[in-house]
Image: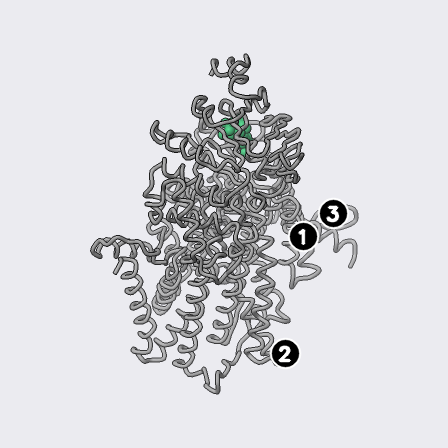
Amino acid sequence: MSIGFWLLQSLNALALGGLLFLLSSGFSLIFGLMRVANLSHGAYFMLGAYVGLSVLQAGFGFIEAILAAGIVIAILGGLIERFLLRRLANRTLAQVLVTLGLAFAIADICLMLWSGDPMQLPAPKWLSQPIRAFGFVFPGYRVFVVEVSIVVALLLWLLIERTKLGAMVRASVDDIQMARGVGIPAQKLFSFIFCLGAALAGMGGVLGGPILSVYPGLDGEMLPLALVVVILGGIGSIGGAFVGAYITGFVYTFGQTLLPAFSYVILFLPMIVILAFRPSGLFGKSAP
Amino acid sequence: MTAEIALQINGMTKNFGGLKAIDRVDLTIPKGDRRLLLGPNGAGKTTLFNLITGDLKPTAGSVQLFGRDITGLASHHCAPLGLARTYQIITLFPKNTLAENVVLSLLGISPLRWSPISRIKGRKEFEERARAALKQVGLDAKADRPLGETSYGEKRRLEIALALAQNPSLLLLDEPLAGLSRQERLDVQALIESIPRDITLILIEHDMDVALALADSITVMYHGRVICEGDRAQVVADPRVKEIYLAS
Amino acid sequence: MTNTSRITTISVTLLILALAAPLLLGQPFYINIGSQVLIAAIFAMSLNILVGYGGMTSIGHAAYLGTSAYVVALLTLQHGFSFYSASAVALLVVVIMAAIFGAIALRGTGITFLMITLALGQTMWGVAFRWSDVTGGDNGLPDIKRPDLFGLNLVEPGLFYAVMIALFMVALAGMWIFIHSGLGLSLQGTRDQPRRMGMLGHHVWLVRWIAFIIAGFWAGVAGIAFIGYHGYIHPLSLGLANSAEVLLMVIAGGAGTLLGPVVGATIVVVLKMVVSAYVSRWVLLLGCTFVAIVILLPEGVVPGLERLLKSILPAARDDGEAGS
Ligand SMILES: Nc1ncnc2c1ncn2[C@@H]1O[C@H](COP(=O)(O)OP(=O)(O)O)[C@@H](O)[C@H]1O
Ligand SMILES: [Mg+2]
């Protein structure tokens, strides 16, 4: 296999890592803030992709499709947070099980509305121009995905580290009781972060569509990847999600290339190593 | 010589992030002693217990139990070594009866805890010893009541029963009188006084008067450090102790 | 009679009636539903060890049922094993797998444990789906023959059902013995007060790990019954939906009660059967039922009924053990 092949696989790995970052950064923030492992997150990703597809089919552009998916999924997430999760405040396990039930409901509704056939979500022409560098040709769309994920990571980092809102989020991730005590409106913060995380997953779905295509079961394939990313990177950490997403992207892509039957098993090896030596994840705070 | 020392702590330090919860504490408890650990809230008393029992790993320092190094040993090793404790915040089994609560304690030092087939209920050695432990704390009449039907004061006594049932050599009592009414305090105080003298006791308590009546010797902690140690007269006379207790 | 022994009598009577019902109805259709319920019940009871008695919510339990079924299928189809010797190997494989997966999953507690079990469960799904040279991939493995037992041909639904009743009774008895045993009490203690249990001398981690292996073993037994009944195994049987389904059985029936998972399995299997006869929206219903149960009936049917019965029956001083 040529150097070009390996470079191309690396680019694929980077693109998958970028998608995983969009998916798992929201998951990680929600978990860090509310202790809710949102098991609907994979379903948000898939629903986002389908919504984007319908918007494209209605004749709108790619950017509109991404925005529409983000808004629809954010609203859906907001409703779920407001009317289901909030009723179960402080019952973490019940909240997680509700998100699991919703994941199935959403997946089946997608199946009902968009049928069981895999669908291609075309990348726009202006983004899929091949890029020539170092004497090789790279698919432009994947480069675009990587760029987007880096920009989103930077924006999230700025939001969390450099704004007042971010300071409140950090304080709440550290110690929610204490945060409430000093007057941080934790409930509003939850709602906001939940919608933000949902929107990121939905937009990630559209962005991922041209690479992964859209099909029933996409949710169930993305969710474990997001879990692995979060376990690897450490819960509640944007930096952890970033590093975890790219590690997972590489391991999964090369696993699929070299040992397709066992790509899933290989995927879990880094997770097992991390759990064995650093159960709180690469960037997670270790327990005292 | 070491045989005469129940517990020996050297240079114990525990940091929580930037906070030095325990700061270079040395402590020697002779066998048979009844030691009172005194100090305002947040002084580090409970943390010191947690370090002794392996609930927390020390940042530095060592613990010896009857001459044996137990530093950093996981807490399930304590019971077989004769170390038992109670909790400041009640830590009992809410779905069980009082007798079943004590049975779980007895099971902890019985090999039957590994058996997936031997039925425990109805075994004489467990039933009788559970009842004896409950009797010791005056709860035998309520042995078959669920925990939910007992008062707070009774729960405090059950805490002690769970520890006593294991017939420990060293018993750590973390604020056994906390939250009790005046009458209940007297009851529990009498109960503690009735604990056989061959059990070495370390007792955390706020109420100077009660505690002083129970203890042979006193260690005063403040901000993670031992600031004074001695008998009742020595401690009461110590200017730093006066300062802390008048200030708070 | 105390209330508890009355409730026990009522439960036992109901259980016998329920077991006899398919035979009384007579038709193979009902008898087959009976077999499916019992297989699901064994599966749900195995998960109940973790969820109900251990307080460890696993969303990857289908991996054990599925792996066991795949091993039986592969060994009988491709390596000339008899059904029974293949079953023995399957149990061994599942126990080893549970030992390894348990050691990994128990690095986390609570929600982290749940996430790891989900991820590990999906690994096994991935293997079954992608390793198609061996597992047949999306086609699954068909045509596993039901074995004979003592010269009787178990293809006959009534006979198969009788074997399932026997297996279920063994599992139920084993479960009763386990939850009243030293290890069982220790497990329940670690669910309620892990810290205190440690201080009392119980090795919390090891107790949980052993429970994880026992749960894997019984899920493996259910897997053998499953492949015996269907004669067919597909990656979906190891998947997330199946893990969620069995978790729903445990929670809907009543986690941490002896009969809860049995009741839950009955409800879910019958519901699935009825719904699938009319519409193909079982997954949607599964999801919605999940949400509804968690919000409206979080403790499950059996504890609710138990309370109802206690309030109906004339008050008697209750000093027996709980109806579980
Ligand atoms: N697990 C922990 N993490 C962080 N800080 C802790 C922890 N446990 C105790 N502390 C802190 O250590 C100090 C000593 O606490 P503690 O030992 O409970 O005091 P005491 O029992 O003397 O009232 C307090 O400031 C408390 O907030
Ligand atoms: Mg304290």
Badge 3 amino acid = Arg
Q: Which mark is residue A132?
A: 3
Residues at marks 1 and 2 touching, judged by CB atoms closer than 8 Å: no
Residue for badge 2: C79
Rounded to the nearest angstrom, the CA distance separating label 1 from label 3 is 26 Å
- Disc 1 secondary structure class: helix
| Circles 1 and 3 on the same chain | yes
- Image coordinates of residue C213 in percent, x first then y, are 55, 60
In this view of the protein, can residue A65 be seen by the observer? no
Q: Nearer the viewer, mark 1 or mark 3?
A: 1
- Disc 2 secondary structure class: loop
Q: Which mark is residue A251?
A: 1
**Residue drawn at (21%, 56%) of the image:** C312
Crowding at dot 1, Cα within 10 Å, few <14 / some 14-19 / many 20+, comes out as many
Indicate left or right for B132 with B226 as reference: left
Q: Disc 3: which chain?
A: A
**Residue drawn at (29%, 60%) of the image:** C7
Rounded to the nearest angstrom, the CA distance separating label 1 from label 2 is 33 Å
Crowding at dot 2, Cα within 10 Å, few <14 / some 14-19 / many 20+, comes out as few
Q: Nearer the viewer, residue B90 or C92?
A: B90
Q: Which mark is residue C262?
A: none
| Circles 1 and 2 on the same chain | no
Indicate left or right for A215 with B97 as reference: right
**Residue drawn at (54%, 52%) of the image:** A223
Q: Quadrant of residue C129?
A: bottom right
Rounded to the nearest angstrom, the CA distance separating label 3 from label 2 is 52 Å
Q: Disc 1: which chain?
A: A
**Disc 1 or 3, which lies upstream in sequence?**
3
Question: C184 above or below C192?
Answer: below
